[in-house]
């Protein structure tokens, strides 16, 4: 395989992280700055451009000096690959911004932008447990529930770039209010705030997902029930995704996937329990092996690097 290098940028609500990434997943020159320090988008764009130009200069001093940069891959919440826009995410105050085209003009490199669940899935396909897997669904369980869908070897985005929003499928009729304004969606049960609500219902007091996890590991029976209920809702939601897409693999990641050491096995149990009979036991549930700290930057760079795989 010809050596390639890209710049990966992960725009989070709190921090922006970026680095040079090689085709085999090596990161160089990793750096970050506070997204929150730039409430005005034009100021943010200037700062991001400065960091990218510094990385381009830094590359010249490394063993990668002779390899051209194939482009800049960017992952961000509510980003849309189809039009290159970031569209009013909850924790970024910029409104609707044309990041891909403006950044491309500023840095003079091709830029591709996608939402962070999709970049996580592409990263998983290129560098993670989904390497070589044609049909899989990545499910990220954090503040929200994000999903990225691969079918027949392709990332599925569909007409407006909004396919694969598995966090907003229904798991309870008229259930809990979801962050999107809908009711009974998976995100309201399998996100970190969903776990807090389940803890309140079962344990009678407010607990964070981390506290539930610690108590569960210490053998607390009620905390264990919270973990089990979360795994059940997730398995139920995934059974719906499975009926549509017949994946061979679900990759789960994010804080909630660490609720207990056997959390992915519990999810596997409930997925198989609820799954459409002909596809029962056809999908394996695995934990992501991507590093929590830098996996998002690798995934963003993979947006560029995956196009050069063959
Ligand atoms: Zn929702």
Image (tube, rainbow, N blue to C red):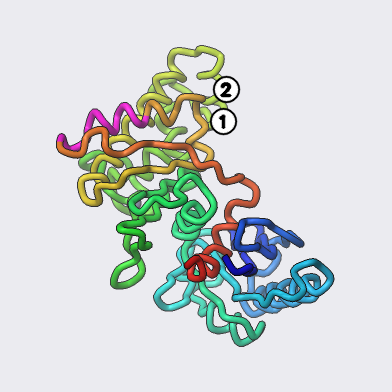
> In the image, which residues are magenta?
267-277
Image quadrant in which you'd find residue 278:
top left
Describe the element under mark 1 as helix, strand or loop: helix
Q: Residue 214 carries which label?
A: 2
How far from the left and from the top, in percent, is residue 197?
Answer: 42, 33
In contact (CB < 8 Å): disc 1 and disc 2? yes
Question: What's the mark number on residue 210?
Answer: 1
- Residue 36 appears in the picture as rendered: no
Measure the alpha-carbon separation of dots 1 and 2. 6 Å
Does residue 213 belong to the magenta stretch?
Answer: no
Q: Quick one: SS at disc 2?
A: helix
Would you say the beta carbon of the disc 2 residue lies within 8 angstroms of ligand 1?
Answer: no
**Few, some or many residues within 10 Å of mark 2 (<14, 14–19, 20+):** some
Overall secondary structure of the magenta section: helix
Count of marks placed on residues: 2
Q: Nearer the viewer, residue 128 or 259?
A: 128
* Residue 79 as seen in the image, left or right of residue 38: left
Question: Residue at position x 20%, y 41% from top?
Answer: 173
Q: In this view, does 3 lie above or below 167?
A: below
Judged from this view, the residue extending furthest toward the right is: 61
| Residue in view at x 30 percent, y 68 percent | 158
270 in the magenta segment: yes
Residue at 53% of width from left, 25% of height from top?
Answer: 213
Left or right of 54? Residue 172 is left
């Amino acid at each position: 395989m010809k050596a390639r290098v890209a710049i990966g940028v992960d725009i989070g609500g709190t921090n922006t992280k970026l680095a040079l990434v090689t085709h085999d997943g090596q990161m160089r020159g990793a750096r970050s700055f506070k997204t929150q320090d730039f409430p005005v988008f034009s100021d943010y764009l200037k700062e991001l451009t400065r960091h990218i130009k510094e990385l381009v200069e830094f590359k010249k001093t490394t063993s990668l000096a002779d390899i051209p940069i194939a482009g800049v891959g960017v992952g961000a919440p509510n980003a849309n690959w189809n039009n290159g826009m970031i569209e009013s995410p909850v924790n970024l105050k910029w409104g609707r911004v044309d990041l891909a085209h403006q950044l491309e003009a500023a840095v003079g490199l091709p830029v591709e932008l996608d939402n962070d669940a999709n970049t996580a899935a592409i990263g998983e396909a290129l560098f993670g447990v989904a390497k070589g897997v044609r049909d899989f669904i990545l499910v990220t369980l954090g503040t929200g529930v994000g999903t990225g869908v691969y079918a027949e070897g392709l990332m599925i985005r569909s007409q407006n770039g909004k396919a694969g929003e598995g966090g907003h499928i229904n798991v309870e009729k008229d259930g809990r209010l979801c962050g999107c304004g809908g009711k009974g969606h998976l995100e309201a049960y399998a996100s970190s705030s969903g776990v807090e609500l389940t803890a309140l219902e079962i344990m009678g007091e407010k607990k964070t997902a981390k506290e539930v996890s610690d108590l569960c590991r210490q053998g607390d029976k009620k905390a264990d029930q919270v973990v089990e209920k979360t795994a059940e809702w997730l398995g139920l939601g995934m059974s719906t995704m499975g009926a549509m897409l017949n994946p061979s693999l679900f990759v789960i990641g994010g804080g909630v996937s660490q609720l207990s050491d056997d959390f992915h096995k519990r999810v596997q149990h409930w997925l198989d329990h609820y799954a459409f009979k002909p596809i029962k036991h056809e999908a394996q549930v695995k934990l992501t092996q991507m590093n929590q700290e830098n996996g998002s930057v690798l995934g963003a760079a993979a947006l560029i690097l995956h196009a050069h795989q063959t």
